[in-house]
Image (cartoon, rainbow, N blue to C red):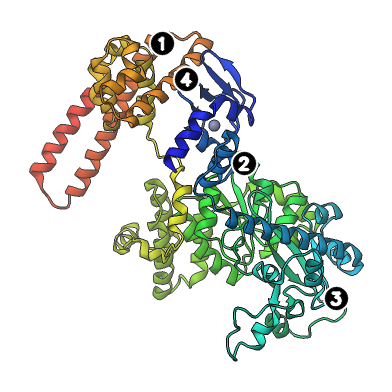
Amino acid sequence: MESQKEEIKNKLDIVEVIGEYLKLQKSGTNYQALCPFHKEKTPSFFVSPSRQIWHCFGCNTGGDIFTFVMKIENIDFREALEILAKKAGIKLTYENPQARSQKQKLININKEAAIFFENNLWRNKEVIEYLHRRGLKDETIREFHLGWALDDWRSLSNYLIKKEFKPEEIIANGLAINRREIAEINAKPQAESCKLKDTDLYDRFRSRIIFPLEDQSGNFVGFTARIFQGKNPLKTIKDIERVGKYINTPQTEIFDKGKVLYGLSRTKKNLHMEEAIIVVEGQMDFLALWQEGIRNAVATSGTALTSYHLALLKKYNDNLILGFDMDEAGEKAAEKTIDLVLFKGFNVKILRLPEGKDLAEYLLTDQGKNSIKELIKKSEPIMSFYFERAKKHSDKKTVEGKKTIAAFFLSKIKKLNNALEKAFWLERLSRYLEIPLAALEEELKKISLNNEAYGYNDENEDNLKVINDFLAPFESRAEKIADRLLAFFVKFPKKFELAINYLKYFPSSFQNIIEILKSVSSEKDLAEENLKKLNISDEIINKISLLNLKADYEIEILDKFNVNIDEELKKGLIELKQEMLKKEMEAIGFQIKNLEKSRDNKKIKELLEKFTQLSKELIK
Ligand SMILES: [Zn+2]
């Protein structure tokens, strides 16, 4: 596959590929555009035809044609490979046409079924009226192709068979159930040669409101079906529980409820530009938000958020607002989800509705409609949510109560990464419980934090690898400064002498490029052919390419503001030095604090000397 990837890369021109998605403008030897992956007014998205790479200096993402297509289409590598192979006129060797056509067939069945359901719906006034009462407008019902499954055992199966789909296919797609299989569940297993007859099928969805579920590309991959009781309501809650208020398409070759997010195909293009992604439970909540013009939501369908969902969402945004039902059971479930979401590195807020109302219901009221955007803006930070929950856990007037509350909330504090935030919440807890801060700190130390504490086992972790591979790596401020400086030095190797006294301040990950810069005297020495001759690794050559592109971008900005490059470089070097010294001093401060208990005075004295020396260097 690797060689085919190269073959495709050689055949296609990056400017042409990206040009199909974005309006590229020539700028020197490169092209630029407004970045499609973050909100911006001046272009920081660059494409280099000579190096066949792209990079956005605003959101710091980049790569080749594959990463671009993956990101803009929100697809995985394999799918990008298929799209680009087609464009390049290359036949992929691994592709199994049979499996492909089977998948397409299942999607086609769903498409037909959706049409059937949708036509039924518009003939059923009672259901339409019900949907209106629940706040849905006709345009929304049409836009999302809501449907109605007749109160009948075989109408859909008959319809699909008339459309020349085979009974086996209809069953494989989860739309019908094999009657014989159920009858014979306790008898002998069905012989393979035994052909299914049309009359062996019965419809899975009967007398239900249908919500088609789309994958990210908008294909109908499955359905959620909500019970509708109409004129013959089921008598008791037990009856409803027996048949299920909501049922989904079972797992099929194209459907997995743990991977589908309702609405994602419609809102994905907005998600990276919004402050956060709103995650709600169920189609009705999603549609209610949609009708209020809120275009940055997605919904789960009959399942909690999975690791797969989160990896998917992480591609678009690091911030989530959870709009879950917050009754007691809801809060408990939310807590589990929140732990997973935090574990996956998201910032989380909670959307709080007055009196724990259900979102879709709340949006039926004028008050709800008028205040929802404000409420979303004022979503509660996760720690305040936990603090409120902790208070409810027990009575703070008793010792036992204090202990219970502290145990719950301290375990949440422990998971915070930011020391200031930790201190803030410890202080609040201390005041609330009227327990000295030191005692709580002592307790906090006892709580061990390991991944098992989160209680997840990620069966899908392998699947996620592809997705996670392109989450941007964390970059410290020092690294950012160093990166920018090296860009200029790669572009103008002669200016490198300005940096001679600062080399030790460059983070270690940049030292290999510094070594190269030490040995070159002109820009030509850094040409790719030259570097290859010197046996420099591809990784470093790519890094130099990217630095070159970054320099073009930086120079353009400096020119615009008439800034002298040498002055800018000198300033940057000093900044880098200060940043690195501060970091080192911070680390020493931390060590000293840790040693204070051990009373290792000799070591402490040593560190203090080092600290003083660094602080002198800092102001030099
Ligand atoms: Zn960007």
Which dot, 3 or 1, sits closer to the camera?
Answer: 3
Contact (Cβ within 8 Å) of mark 3 with mark 2: no
Q: Report how far apart the C-alphas of labels 2 and 1 lie in the structure.
A: 35 Å
Question: Quick one: which residue is furthest to the bottom in this view?
Answer: 187
**Towards the viewer: 482 or 94:** 94
How many other residues sit within 10 Å of disc 1, few (<14), some (14-19) or many (≥20)? some
| Residue bearing the label numbered 1 | 565
Q: Where is residue 545 in the image (x, y as percent from the top left)?
A: 40, 23
Q: Where is residue 163 in the image (x, y as percent from the top left)?
A: 80, 63
* Amino acid at pointer 3: Gly
Disc 3 element: loop
Which dot, 4 or 2, sits closer to the camera?
Answer: 4
| Residue bearing the label numbered 2 | 274
| Residue bearing the label numbered 4 | 50
Pointer 4 or 2: first along the chain: 4
Q: Position of residue 613 (x, y in %)?
A: 17, 27
Residue 230: numbered disc: 3
Left or right: where does residue 516 sit relative to residue 405?
left
Q: Report how far apart the C-alphas of labels 4 and 1 lie in the structure.
A: 24 Å
